[in-house]
Image (spheres, rainbow, N blue to C red):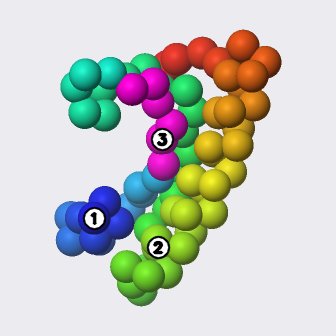
Amino acid sequence: HAVRQALAAGVKVTGSTVHYVTPEVDAGPVICREEVLVESGDTEESLHERVKKVEHRLIVEAVRSLHRRDATST
């Protein structure tokens, strides 16, 4: 629902974040993140496709970082 909410709110930038899990929802330290620009005329489908590409890349980056043990939180 995040993409739908971003479009409804009229934001210009959304994105994806990989973070450590904590008891509070979405409150863990960030491992990596990347912004995705909301383009004029974006639909839920078009924006979601771009966000998914970023998500796929970030999860691989996060796992590699954890494997190397150099993941830092921001």
* Type of amino acid under label 2: Leu
Mark 1: amino acid = His
Q: What element carries label 3?
A: strand
Left or right, residue 28 beside residue 10: right
Q: Name the residue under label 1.
A: 1
The span from disc 1 to disc 3 (Cα, nearest Å) is 15 Å
Assess whether residue 36 is covered by the magenta stretch.
Answer: no
| Dot in front, 1 or 2 | 1
Q: Earlier in the sequence, mark 1 or mark 3?
A: 1
Which quadrant is home to the N terminus? bottom left
Residue 25, quarter of the rendered image:
top left
Q: Which of marks 3 and 2 is nearer the N terminus?
A: 3
Is 69 drawn above or below residue 32 in the view shown?
above
**Dot 1 crowding, Cα within 10 Å, few <14, some 14–19, many 20+:** few
Q: Rounded to the nearest whole Å, what is the CA distance between mark 3 and mark 2?
A: 16 Å
Image mark for residue 51? none
Which percent across, then down, holds residue 37? 50, 62
Tell me the crowding category of disc 3: few under 14, some 14 to 19, or many 20 or more residues within 10 angstroms, Cα based: some
- Gap in Å between the C-alphas at discs 1 and 2? 12 Å
Magenta segment, principal secondary structure? strand
Q: In this view, does 47 lie to the left or right of 7?
A: right
Q: Nearer the viewer, residue 15 or 52?
A: 52
Q: Is residue 19 magenta?
A: yes
Residue under label 3 = 17
Residue that numbered label 2 is attached to: 47
